[in-house]
Amino acid sequence: MGSELPTPADTVATLGEFGLIRRVTEGRLQPATTLLGPGDDAAVVAADDGRVVATTDVLVENVHFRLDWSTPEQVGRKAAAVNMADVAAMGAMPTALLVGLGCPADTPADVADQLISGMWKEAASAGAGIIGGDMVTADNLVISITALGNLAGRDPVTRSGAQVGDVLAVRGRLGWAAAGLAVLGRGFRSPVAVVGAQRVPEPPYAAGPQAAAAGATAMIDVSDGLLADIGHIATASGVAIDVRTELLVVHQRLIDVASALGADPRHWVLTGGEDHALAATFPEPAAVPADWQTIGTVRAGSGVTVDGRPYEGSSGWEHWQ
Amino acid sequence: MGSELPTPADTVATLGEFGLIRRVTEGRLQPATTLLGPGDDAAVVAADDGRVVATTDVLVENVHFRLDWSTPEQVGRKAAAVNMADVAAMGAMPTALLVGLGCPADTPADVADQLISGMWKEAASAGAGIIGGDMVTADNLVISITALGNLAGRDPVTRSGAQVGDVLAVRGRLGWAAAGLAVLGRGFRSPVAVVGAQRVPEPPYAAGPQAAAAGATAMIDVSDGLLADIGHIATASGVAIDVRTELLVVHQRLIDVASALGADPRHWVLTGGEDHALAATFPEPAAVPADWQTIGTVRAGSGVTVDGRPYEGSSGWEHWQ
């Protein structure tokens, strides 16, 4: 059964738990770090330096994603990406994902297949494999992913190491997912570039270990918005962080979309979440890797400012809304 | 806010995501294996022998637990226990849990507090800590837990290593949770011993590494019922397993409860799930640790028999019902 394609009539209920678990695992290529893959009570993953990085995130339909805006494969990619971005933000490379999937019993098996296929694609793009999972009936679609990672002997880069005099730099997209959300929210499906960014983020996974190796003092992934997330660094480190708008690169495509919607593209860059760029502090400008963009400085004090002043406007969002 | 007790009016929504995350972590004692605890993008856990065991399970309200049958603390203990039993079944000791919690926005904060408190108690009982979590709004209460574990240099004990001539042994309760379910299903709340076993299993965590050290060739935790679960060993190992009923110990309390309900206590022992005992095969009777109970033999062939014959009756259950 496991190797046959589901028919349109198949649901997760008719396939059964074990049929679905076979679909997660059969014919997938595990990375060398997967010492024992799925199918037993637990999996075993290499943790060469004697430590493992671990993080978990839960995504709920109509809270964190919409199946009328994204394909199941895009949702799967996004769910994997948000977790692996957290691993990268510690300075580690993702090695493995574990997936908990709750879905209504009448969910088409094809939807579960595509979700899992998307997770595998995103995992493979970062060198990780899916090593375990559990699937249960639930009233709505809930995806819980745990990502594991490898520090390769480096110290983890936490949020609390920023020092007065450091510089702030970012790597990855900022404001793109917010622009996509604005477009989708008005009923449009293009431009594809920003809508695609909302559907599937592109975290710069390798930039996490790169920043760690370059001496980053603090790092975070930008999930809730740049100002909100560097605010976590400021609080944890006991410092103030100032962002200089003249250093912010606002991509022409964001300017175009904002112009069409009557929006402020810089606001998207400063406050837009879900792009999962990395923001890190470095001890000196010369330490910032070439493909990172320096956008601010670490100062004595507390809180986050933009050009020396508190930013006027929303600086992120909480999930309990 | 984090150190104040919630008022009865507080819900997960009024506390907010960050308030709840503080409740998960504040004032908890992490084991020495937690190198970096919760509060950053990810945690870091010791994996001394260069490997980590990982498994995930999802529990859904009214599918896997009922809040009219169990307190939130009992549900939290059970959710942690079912995952850590999977770690033990590989021959590893649990080191860390990551918790994904989806709950309706109007869930009282006190319920979330008690759930998490129960998870911490169970984790601590096995020497593990809760190192990360995520909390989101969902239509119903969904608990997703990932457990990590340490093999301490031993090979993992899989389901596939049983050999013809091995003996089958178990450690831990069998049939108690099924008896409790039968009692609760008829509207009773006692006897406390079996009802308590249904609410909170007592997996023999240390028996997993003990069996591995004693040379167990295959192992599984009994989550779906003894016959169903040793069936997984038989299939994965390409062997037949025969259970001898004269070797099965049926506790007097199960006999008493079965007598009162007109049920067959041996059926509970053979097919009852949710006790999370450990079942393992050993190369010879002398290898079975003293506190394990030898109950059968591994033979050439396939499938599971009871006293040499197929068991007449249900041999487990699937989750998609």
Image: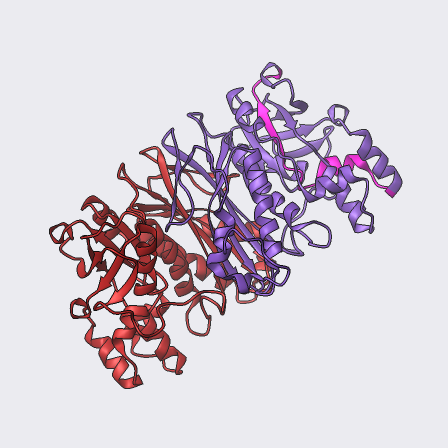
Chain colours: A purple, B red
Q: In the rendering, at what x and y percent does residue B83 appear? A: 39, 54
Q: How many marks?
A: 0
Q: Is A301 displayed left or right of B172 in the figure?
A: right
Q: Is residue B58 left or right of residue B296?
A: right
Tell whether A248 sits left or right of A39.
right
Residue at 23% across, 81% down: B256
In this rendered view, identify the residue nearer to me: B307 or B175.
B307
Q: Position of residue A13 (x, y in %)?
A: 54, 64
- On-image quarter of the C terminus of chain A: bottom right
Looking at the image, residue A297 lies above or below residue A272: above
Of B315 and A35, which appears nearest the observer?
B315
Kindly tell me whether residue A108 is visible in this rendering: yes
Determine if residue A312 is in view: no
Query: Looking at the image, which residue is at 66% across and 34% down?
Result: A304
Where is residue A290 drawn, in percent x and y? 64, 17
Magenta span covers which residues? A261-285
Residue A319 painted magenta? no
Which residue, as the protein is rendered here, is positioned at the far top? Answer: A286
Quarter location, residue A50? top left
Viewer-side residue, B45 vs B273: B273
Residue at the far left in the pictured view: B286
In the picture, measured across the screen, residue A245 lies left or right of residue B127, that is right
- Establish if A295 lies above or below B254: above
User: Which residue does the image show at 55% across and 38% down from the upper left?
Assistant: A123
Indicate yes or no whether the magenta region holds residue A262: yes
